[in-house]
């Protein structure tokens, strides 16, 4: 109950804050004089901001990495609750990805274990608070040049339990909408340059010496100094390696989709029960205080309903804890084929991703020769 009391201490303060969006689009800092707008903003799913969707992607098509969510277990978290946070951090990125894909505005949107230059833009999210009823996320959108497009706080609370887990997807519509505003504020040349820088940063990771002179660090962001020839054979080899990395991301997408199908219903029931329990506590605690001061009656029926809600919450919580503990650290091996060889990757998603990227770099160096 300690975490419940702490929620009731700080949450009203959060709800007193005016939840709004100030204009987040500024001229992006492609050159060194301009500065990005980085003031945090807040969004509430209750505002029901619709998703801006179009028939085809904005050109040039912008690929996006949705990084698996980060979370910092609190001192009160038991091992089981920490497992729930880890489960949640892998479930929600799939909903985030679907929100971006549904807008039809972007190129390929992939869920990745860690940020990388595989795409020009990385979206990094931290779970600040999650107790079943209240969900607070800190989202940062950063491009390959190091410029932070914006930072935003997403806050979700449903007055009544949501019908299904997909209702949370609407929480991420605002990110897609704000990204659209920023992307449209860039000129065509600036968009093309950002994508080119991302491609060269990826190539530089594979062959630092060969690609070190194309991008330089400016006062505000990375800038493109020159570009390799379109028919550069080394760039062709880099693209072949990148395609192999795409295969890994596709395999991870399948894993996370299966995880959402397997664990999503239990997670949703837990959120429903937690919402019912928290709502009853909001109603019951003032009445209990009134009775203690001699101002209220017995209210036995309400007490019984409160207990029933509490019992339901504990049942669903236990089910989620058991499922999360069973899935903690569980990542199915990824089997991929490269150079006519079958490779099996095991361990956590981050470990598999690191191993795959290392292997691809080794293959590139063997084909190209030692370039560093």
Image (cartoon, helix red, strand yellow):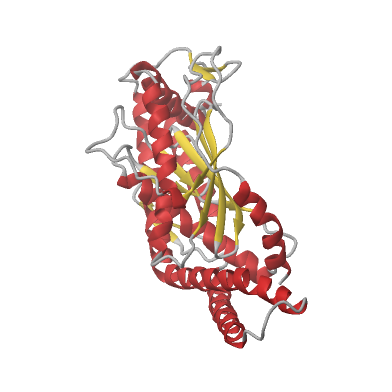
Question: Is residue 337 positioned above or below 54 on the image?
Answer: below
Could you tell me how many numbered marks the image carries? 0
Q: Is residue 88 visible?
A: yes
Quadrant placement of the N terminus = bottom right
Q: Name the spot of residue 296 as percent of width and height, x first.
A: 69, 79
Front residue of this view, candidates 256 and 105:
105
Q: Name the spot of residue 113 as percent of width and height, x first.
A: 51, 49
Q: Residue at x 44, y 36 (%)?
A: 364
Front residue of this view, candidates 101 and 299:
299
Question: Is residue 121 positioned above or below 18 on the image?
Answer: above
Q: Residue furthest front?
A: 295
Q: Residue at x 57, y 52 (%)?
A: 136
Q: Residue at x 57, y 67 (%)?
A: 328
Question: Is residue 47 positioned above or below 84 on the image?
Answer: above
Question: Is residue 116 positioned above or below 210 on the image?
Answer: below
Front residue of this view, candidates 276 and 64:
276
Quarter residue 118 falls in: top left
Q: Residue furthest left?
A: 55
Q: Name the spot of residue 162 as percent of width and height, x first.
A: 43, 65
Quadrant placement of the C terminus = top right
Q: Name the spot of residue 115 as percent of width and height, x first.
A: 52, 41
Q: Is residue 343 visible?
A: no
Q: Residue at x 34, y 41 (%)?
A: 108
Quarter residue 9 falls in: bottom right
């Amino acid at each position: 109950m300690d975490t419940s009391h702490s929620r009731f201490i700080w949450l009203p303060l959060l709800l007193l804050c005016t939840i709004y969006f100030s204009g987040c689009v500024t001229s992006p800092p492609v050159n060194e004089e301009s500065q990005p707008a980085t003031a945090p903003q807040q969004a509430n799913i209750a505002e029901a901001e619709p998703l801006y969707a179009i028939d085809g992607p904005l050109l040039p098509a912008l690929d996006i990495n949705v990084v698996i969510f980060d979370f910092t277990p609190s001192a009160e978290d038991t091992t089981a609750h920490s497992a729930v946070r880890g489960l949640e951090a892998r479930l929600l990125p799939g909903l985030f990805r679907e929100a971006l894909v549904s807008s039809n505005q972007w190129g390929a949107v992939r869920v990745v274990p860690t940020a990388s230059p595989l795409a020009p833009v990385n979206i990094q999210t931290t779970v600040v608070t999650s107790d079943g009823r209240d969900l607070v996320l800190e989202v940062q959108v950063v491009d390959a040049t190091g410029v932070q497009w914006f930072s935003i706080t997403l806050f979700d609370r449903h007055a009544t339990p949501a019908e299904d887990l997909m209702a949370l997807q609407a929480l991420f519509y605002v990110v897609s909408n704000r990204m659209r505003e920023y992307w449209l504020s860039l000129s065509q040349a600036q968009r093309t340059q950002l994508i080119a820088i991302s491609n060269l940063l990826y190539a530089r990771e594979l062959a630092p010496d060969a690609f070190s002179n194309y991008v330089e660090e400016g006062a505000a962001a990375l800038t493109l100094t020159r570009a390799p020839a379109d028919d550069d054979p080394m760039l062709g080899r880099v693209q072949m390696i990148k395609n192999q990395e795409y295969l890994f991301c596709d395999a991870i997408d399948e894993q996370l989709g299966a995880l959402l199908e397997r664990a999503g219903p239990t997670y949703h029931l837990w959120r429903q029960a937690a919402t019912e329990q928290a709502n009853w506590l909001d109603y019951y605690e003032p009445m209990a205080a009134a009775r203690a001061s001699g101002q209220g009656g017995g209210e036995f029926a309400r007490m019984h309903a409160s207990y029933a809600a509490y019992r339901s919450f504990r049942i669903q919580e236990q089910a989620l804890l058991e499922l999360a503990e069973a899935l903690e650290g569980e990542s199915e091996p990824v089997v991929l084929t490269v150079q006519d060889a079958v490779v099996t990757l095991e361990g956590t998603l981050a470990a598999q991703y690191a191993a795959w990227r290392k292997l691809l770099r080794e293959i590139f160096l063997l084909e190209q020769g030692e370039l560093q």
